[in-house]
Amino acid sequence: MPRVAILIPASPNAAFLSEVAAFRVALGNLRWTRWHPTIYLYLGGPCDFDLFAKWRRHLPDVEIIWCSPARFEQKDCWAQSDAVFELAPRDADVILTMDADTFPVWAFEDVLDRVLATDCVAGLIAHYPFPLFPGTRPRENWQRAAAGIVDVPLDFQFSYSLMDPAPDDPELQAPFYLNFGVVFFSANRFDGIAKRYLSIRPTIMDRLHDPGFSGQVALTLAITAERCNVWSLGMRYNFPNDPIAERMYPEEKMHAVIYHYLRTTHFDRRLIFSSAEQYHAFLDLKLTGSNHDFQHAVRAFLGNQYPVD
């Protein structure tokens, strides 16, 4: 049976650890028939080890990899994010990187099958262009980021996923620039991409108006440089709790496979799984749209009682 390694970077606090504990329960409730999943959690930063011991009990089959204090001091939160690319397992057939604030509700073995069969990278095109320097345009910023880094032209054949398509405006066309929440890699291509990514990401930080986007941009440049097969996934595989996504992708909303509960307008994603009190408060909220759908999925998968008490 082929293996998928699910790699999640996080900080060792109640917010992240509770999200991963909830993710683990949801993943285990999916119907796996052809693939064997394993979660790998990459942690770095200051840690309350009594708190960690409490949450560790709820992550019994999760492989945990710690970044060294020296590495965290050098890189800050990039330490655990980079560790995903430095220390990925070698015995998987597909590598799946995910954010902690994602929640799977439907099997995605069909995606794993195709990624493996076609040796590709798959994911959702990012919602918007990365933040721009004042007075500049998206393509200008892409060329600034890529200059001297890759010798393969960027292919602007995609559209930012939460912007209305504008085929007559080349500035709104995107390269294969993925939202980091859910990204599938054929293991055969992962090592080459990872080496490129790790060399590119720190190099381009001072080329971006917001260095926090250096990871997503570096991944685009690495995939381009490696000349990978790519697959732009539908919104259902990384559906945000966002009213624009609901308007633009009603069919995808009806068939969501993985929720990405990154918006905090109606609840704080860092708290909802952190305690019984917060969990019940979340379930009691009067929500609409994709927030309601996510709430319904949480209740269906985790139950009315706090699942990690």
Image (cartoon, helix red, strand yellow):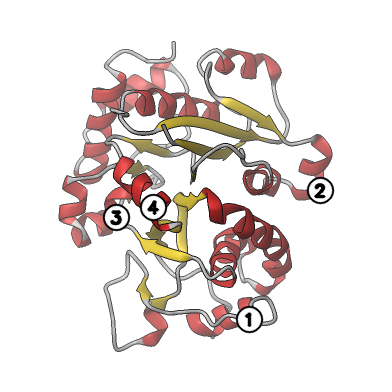
> Observer-nearest residue: 193 or 179?
193
111 displayed left or right of 14: left
Kind of residue at disc 2 = Gln
Residue in the picture at 68% in, 76% down: 149
Disc 1 packing (10 Å; few <14; some 14–19; many ≥20)? few
* Residue 134 appears anywhere in the view: no
> Which sits in the foreground, 113 or 87?
113
For the residues labelled 2 and 3, say whether their Cβ atoms are less than 8 Å apart. no
Between marks 2 and 1 in the image, the one whose residue lies nearer the viewer: 1
- Which residue in the rendered view is the most extreme toward the bottom? 168
Please identify the quarter of the rendering in which residue 198 is found: bottom right
Q: CA distance from mark 2 to mark 3?
A: 36 Å
Labels 3 and 1: the sequence-earlier one: 1
What crowding class fits label 3: few (fewer than 14 Cα within 10 Å), some (14-19), or many (20 or more)? many
Residue at image position (30%, 52%) is 242
Residue 72 position in % (x across, y down): 76, 42
Q: Residues within 10 Å of mark 4 (few under 14, many from 20)?
A: few
Q: Is residue 86 something that shows in the picture?
A: yes
Circle 3 residue = 235
Q: Residue under label 1, please give it.
A: 151
* Mark 4 or 1: the one toward you: 4
Say which label, 3 or 4, has the lower sequence index: 4
- Asked if labels 1 and 2 touch by Cβ distance under 8 angstroms, the answer is no
Residue 74: mark in rendering: 2
Q: Position of residue 58 (x, y in %)?
A: 50, 16
Mark closest to the chain's N terminus, 4 or 1: 4
The image quadrant where one finds the N terminus is: top left
- Disc number for residue 117: 4
The quarter holding residue 206 reads bottom right
